[in-house]
Image (cartoon, rainbow, N blue to C red):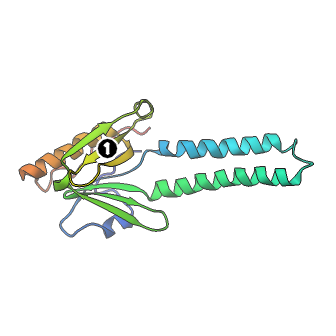
Amino acid sequence: MRLKKSSDTVPASVNNYLLAHERKVIITRRHPAILIPSATSATGGLFVAAAVNPIAKDNKSLELTIWLLAGFFCLRFISACFNWFARLLVFTSHRVLLISGAFSGRVRNIPLEDIKNMTLRRSRGGRTLGYGAFIFDTGSRPDIIVDYIPYPEQTYLKVNGLIFQRREGSLSKSEFNEVRPTAAL
C-alpha cells in the first residue's frame, strides 16, 4: 500500500467529483487494518461452526443456526472488503474529498480554507501497523475524524504543507504533483 501519484491510474469515480481547476494531490484508501475485526469474526465464526457441528448433528435447528451465524459473519467480511475498496480519501489543491459507498456513492467535501487545524492521532495499534487518524477542525461544524490513514506522518506533512501554502497564496502548479513512493507494508 502506498500513496498514489496523481499520474497513477485512479478510479474513474474520483474524476467525477473534481472541479475543472482542481488537481489531485494525494489519493489513498484506508489502511487494510480496518478489515481485521470483520476478518477475525468471520474466521472465528467458521471455526466455531466447524467445532460445534459434530456436537449438533442430532439437533438440525442448532446446526442450521450456527452455520447461518457463520455465514452472516462471512458476508459481513465481504461487505467490509467492498466498502474498503470503494472508500477513498482524496486531497486536491482546493479541498478534501471523502468518497465512500460501494453501492451508493457518498461524497463529503471539506474546503482547505475551512480547515482551522488538523491533528494526527496514532493509537498503539496504529503505530504498530502503520496507520493513524486525522481530526479536521473546521470551527463551524463538529470535528471530522478520518481514521485508518496509511503512512500518516508522510500524509500529514504533505497536507499541512498544502494547507499552509494555500493560505499564503504561494501554491505553484508543479508543487505537490509528485508523492515520493514509500515501502509497501
For the N terminus, give its image quadrant. Answer: top left
The answer to which of 5 and 61 lies nearer the viewer is 61
Which residue does the numbered mark 1 point to in the structure image? Answer: 134
**Res 128 quadrant in image:** top left
Tell me which amino acid carries mark 1.
Phe
The x and y percentages for residue 116 are 18, 47
The answer to which of 92 and 51 lies nearer the viewer is 51
106 sits left or right of 78 in the view: left
The x and y percentages for residue 181 are 32, 43
Which residue occupies 6% across, 49% down?
Answer: 168
Outermost residue to the right: 58
The x and y percentages for residue 120 are 29, 38
Which residue occupies 59% across, 51% down?
Answer: 77
Count how many numbered circles sit on residues in the image. 1
Which residue occupies 38% across, 42% down?
Answer: 150
**Element under disc 1:** strand
Near mark 1 (Cα within 10 A), the count class, few <14, some 14-19 or many ≥20, is many
The answer to which of 123 and 161 lies nearer the viewer is 123
15 sits left or right of 69 in the view: left
The x and y percentages for residue 19 are 23, 68
For the C terminus, give its image quadrant. Answer: top left
Q: Is residue 135 above or below residue 12?
A: above
Which residue occupies 33% across, 39% down?
Answer: 152
